Image: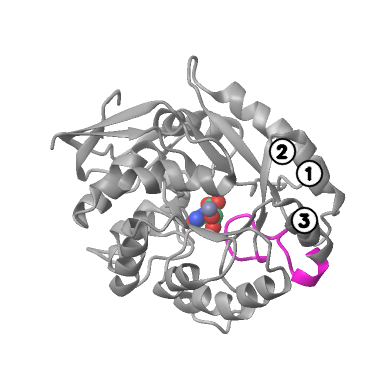
Amino acid sequence: MDTITLTRPDDWHLHLRDGEALRAVVGASAAQFARAIVMPNLRPPVATVAQALAYRQRILEALPAGAAFEPLMTLYLTDNTPADEIRRALDSGGVHAVKLYPAGATTNSDAGVTDLRRTWPVLEAMQACGMPLLVHGEVTDPAVDVFDREAVFIERVLEPLRRDFPALRVVFEHITTRQAAQYVTQAQGPIAATITAHHLLYNRNALFTGGLRPHWYCLPVLKREEHRRALLQAAISGDPRFFLGTDSAPHAARLKEHAAACAGCYTAPHAIELYAAAFEQAGALGRLEAFASFNGPDFYRLPRNTARIVLRRERWTVPESLPFGAEHIVPLAGGETLAWKLADRAS
Ligand code: NCD
Ligand code: ZN
């Protein structure tokens, strides 16, 4: 088999940044995906519908000429988000979800939620209208080992939250552990999870192979091999609760190759090829289309795409560096060879 034809996929978790950085990266996502759920962790965060719609406009203006790409906007939940923002979000037609960052959990999350009880009126409004809550599932308690923060989040935050709001539609974002995959598989009610390509392809050894490698550093951090295997099993299982979300999170190389390296892997330019590598490794290329193109829109209650893409079996090398405004950026797996190539890829 030398080609794979897929319904055009979408990216259900993406960081596009703003300004010069946005202009540098948005074309890469548009070349791969029809739509993307765009994360709101700008500075200041995208906390209101007005801000989200203005950001959406900047994304559309930053697209290369002729690119067809639909940004699906999200709101950044804070302790002070008013419940009627949810009504405005619904009415806008452009805002599709609300993102919960526990304060301090990751890049630009200082404005995140400090006490979930303060957001109850918002969660009630979301539960009532079916708007998904996207959760960054890690506790921030410094006493909890960084590799355990996702598993502890399930017990301390997610289970109580879903007991209090059993009909709330939840996406457990970028899951990284066996516990999270198991939780989603076995849970009652409306919950799904996104899985990144890098968590399907790498375990935490990748961070330390031949030296400390900051381009493999993201949050939640890569875990042990047993967790990677559990994620891969979930992704290829055919369970519609699991779908593609790259968490492509661009940072200039200068800030990655730094004493306090920023968290985030830049995978947008070669995302579908990375996922194809993971699915092929598991002998499950036939399951890629549902994961990449069907399960996400079904959960978000949006139509599936009708256009198709073609991947060809062709060895090519991921660029080691790409322009990033006045800086440069190192894509994940830069310099490595991939076996599948998107047919209309320019280089
Ligand atoms: C993201 C970023 O840089 O915005 N970083 C990351 O490692 N994934 C934030 C996030 O999604 O946690
Ligand atoms: Zn993210």
**Which span is picked out in magenta?**
102-119
**Residue 308 visible in rendering:** yes
Mark 3 vs mark 2, foreground winner is: 3
Q: Are marks 2 and 1 in contact (CB under 8 Å)?
A: yes
According to the image, label 1 marks what residue? 48
According to the image, label 3 marks what residue? 128
Please name the residue shown 34% across and 42% down the image.
Answer: 289
Asked which colour scheme the image uses, the reply is: one colour
According to the image, label 2 marks what residue? 52
Mark 3 vs mark 1, foreground winner is: 3
- Secondary structure beneath label 1: loop
Q: CA distance from mark 3 to mark 2?
A: 22 Å
Number of other residues with Cα within 10 Å of mark 1, as a class: few under 14, some 14 to 19, many 20 or more: many
The three-letter code of the residue at mark 1 reads Thr
The three-letter code of the residue at mark 2 reads Ala
**Residue 333 visible in rendering:** no
Secondary structure that dominates the magenta span: loop
**Cβ of mark 1 under 8 A from ligand 1:** no
Q: Nearer the viewer, residue 240 or 280?
A: 240
Q: Nearer the viewer, residue 189 or 230?
A: 189
- Secondary structure beneath label 2: helix
The spot of residue 119 in percent (x, y) is: 79, 64
The three-letter code of the residue at mark 3 reads Ala
Q: Nearer the viewer, residue 215 or 126?
A: 126
**Cβ of mark 2 under 8 A from ligand 2:** no
Please name the residue shown 23% across and 43% down the image.
Answer: 335
